[in-house]
Image (tube, rainbow, N blue to C red):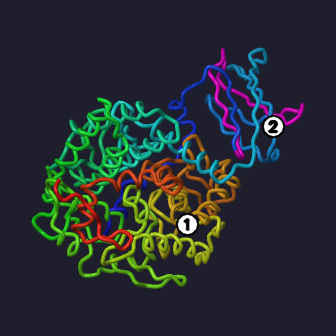
């Protein structure tokens, strides 16, 4: 069984909470009442007002005000399309004291307007909100991302999700949401943490306790090195090493720190002397997990980085015999679904969850990328289109499924639990995970944009929060809209939204990662080609 199925056992008891309430403390309070309009909503933020225990928010398009909400937070997203589109609004914020009396003398006012956004504006908005998960909610002192917004075991940070956050920082710089220096400072905190925390033959654990800065068990025997999570981290760091390439002392030091971390990752240790990579090793339990990594799943980047290592590279046979060997049903597919032949991936579940098309390819550019097993652009586009076609077909009759409501991948279930959602029996449970279609934007831009618009404009009142789209929506759960949404956030779902939309818009992370000579050399060793041409590398290094 693949690791994404074992995640279910860890997270089944995680309960939904109001992420807006829980995360309010991580959003900076302004010094005055601010109202900013978008396509369908207005974001309102305000400072603490005198003697207030709660706040009533009123809005008007003319002279008649109506109550929009009462909240104890200093933040509210007001979806206003019930009042009209392309409108201007006047807001009044009235503090309420302990007796429930409105303190009208303390009322503050602000104006805002909404207008129909272009596709570019919508993507930028979704990226920027989602970016906050890493910038506002991350552990800035460690440079790490929290695993989720409400972890039952305390302040848990994640290696793989933090690697995605590294790439999100690059997007933040490009889009002007943070400065280059701010990003470098955050990354220097990260590399310091990665260098000084628990490592296992150069690899990191899946989780760490942010307060103790020590490895934290993901499951009973999974308390040591996790080479897949470590590869997601290094995927981000190698992209950052190319992006932050100025000759300033800080950026040069960052580059050196990343290089040191990269060169000390002992991929060969994790072969156990065999022609396959093993996912885990524990200093207490050794190889107890006994999990050889056979494809096809999210681990392609793990094998590519293992073959790219300047000091501890695996032999090509480990890739061809371990990852791809024997054509297991989970590797070679060659079945046809909805008129499309899928080269690779789980046959039973039509290729598996869509994160297979995301995690490895946040840095690794699949355009023109081929080896003896697949054309990887074709593979990812077809898996995405099959996932979409399955949802349109909707064999189990879930509410809402269609051309603008699709996307099955790993994420929180509604109303509770976690699973690797995918097409097919026992994997399709009616929950659509926004990251699935949104992170597929490079492969299916028109189809993914339809989902973005539908989820935001028609379900945003409950589905869109302070850090972008919440993790899951299931219209078949009860009759109340508020019960259809799992109001949680996960780093591994948030990161691909920011990064893959940017790869569609500008190719930013793809371009940076693919400039790494080590990576190109590793791809060449494994007989990959790009645009049907041999990969060119500097062999003198």
Task: Relative to 31, say whether 60 is above or below.
Answer: below
- Look at the image and give the residue range highlighted in magenta: 39-65
Judge the density around disc 1: few (<14), some (14-19), many (≥20) Cα neighbours within 10 Å.
some
Residue 135: x and y in percent read 46, 37
Is 4 on the left-hand or right-hand side of 403? left
Residue 231: x and y in percent read 29, 54
Helix, strand or loop at label 1? It is loop
Q: Is residue 386 magenta?
A: no
Between residues 69 and 530, which one lies in front from this camera angle?
530
Question: Which residue is labeled 2 in the image?
Answer: 88
Gap between marks 2 and 1 measured at Cα: 34 Å
Q: Quadrant of the N terminus?
A: bottom left
Q: Earlier in the sequence, mark 2 or mark 1?
A: 2
Name, please, the residue furthest toward the right. Answer: 63
> What residue is at 46 percent from the left and 32 percent from the top?
179
> What residue is at 45 percent from the left and 42 percent from the top?
150
Question: Which residue is labeled 1 in the image?
Answer: 444
């Amino acid at each position: 069984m693949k690791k994404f199925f074992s995640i279910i056992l860890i997270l089944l008891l995680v309960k939904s909470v109001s992420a807006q309430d829980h995360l309010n403390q991580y959003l900076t309070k302004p010094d005055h009442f601010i109202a900013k309009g978008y396509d369908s909503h207005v974001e309102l933020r305000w400072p603490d007002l005198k003697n207030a225990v709660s706040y009533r928010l009123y809005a008007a398009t003319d002279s008649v005000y109506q109550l929009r909400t009462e909240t104890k937070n200093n933040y509210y997203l007001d979806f206003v399309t019930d009042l009209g589109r392309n409108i201007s609004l006047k807001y009044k914020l009235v503090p309420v004291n302990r007796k429930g009396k409105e303190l009208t003398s303390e009322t503050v006012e602000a104006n805002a307007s909404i207008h129909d956004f272009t596709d570019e504006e919508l993507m930028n908005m979704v990226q920027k909100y989602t970016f906050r998960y890493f910038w506002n909610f991350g552990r800035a002192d460690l440079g790490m991302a929290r695993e989720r917004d409400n972890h039952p075991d305390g302040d848990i940070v994640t290696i793989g999700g933090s690697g995605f956050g590294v790439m999100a920082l690059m997007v933040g710089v490009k889009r002007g949401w943070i400065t280059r220096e701010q990003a470098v400072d955050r990354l220097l905190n990260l590399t310091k943490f990665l260098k000084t925390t628990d490592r296992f033959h150069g690899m990191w654990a899946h989780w760490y306790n942010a307060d103790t800065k020590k490895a934290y068990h993901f499951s009973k025997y999974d308390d040591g090195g996790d080479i897949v999570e470590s590869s997601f981290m290094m995927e981000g760091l190698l992209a950052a090493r190319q992006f932050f390439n100025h000759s300033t002392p800080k950026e040069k030091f960052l580059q050196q720190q990343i290089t040191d971390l990269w060169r000390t990752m002992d991929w060969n240790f994790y072969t156990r002397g065999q022609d396959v990579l093993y996912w885990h090793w524990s200093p207490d339990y050794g190889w107890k997990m006994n999990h050889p990594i056979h494809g096809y799943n999210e681990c392609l980047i793990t094998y590519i980085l293992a073959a790219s290592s300047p000091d501890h590279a695996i032999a090509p046979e480990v890739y061809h015999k371990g990852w791809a060997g024997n054509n297991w049903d989970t590797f070679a597919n060659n079945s046809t679904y909805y008129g499309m032949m899928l080269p690779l991936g789980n046959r039973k579940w039509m290729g598996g969850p869509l994160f297979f098309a995301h995690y490895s390819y946040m840095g690794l550019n699949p355009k023109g990328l081929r080896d003896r097993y697949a054309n990887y652009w074709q593979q990812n586009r077809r898996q995405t289109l099959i996932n979409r076609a399955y949802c349109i077909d909707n064999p189990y009759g879930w509410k809402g499924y269609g051309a603008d409501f699709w996307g099955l991948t790993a994420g929180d279930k509604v109303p509770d639990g976690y699973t690797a959602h995918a097409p097919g029996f026992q994997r399709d449970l009616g929950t659509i995970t926004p990251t699935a279609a949104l992170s597929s934007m490079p492969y299916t831009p028109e189809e993914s944009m339809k989902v973005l618009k539908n989820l935001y404009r028609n379900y945003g009142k409950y589905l869109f929060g302070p850090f972008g789209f919440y993790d899951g929506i299931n219209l078949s759960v009860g009759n109340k809209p508020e019960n259809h949404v799992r109001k949680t956030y996960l780093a591994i779902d948030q990161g691909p939204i920011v990064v893959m939309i940017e790869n569609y818009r500008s190719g930013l992370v793809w371009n940076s990662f693919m400039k790494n000579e080590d990576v190109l050399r590793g791809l060449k060793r494994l007989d990959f080609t790009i645009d049907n041409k041999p990969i060119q590398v500097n062999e003198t290094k």
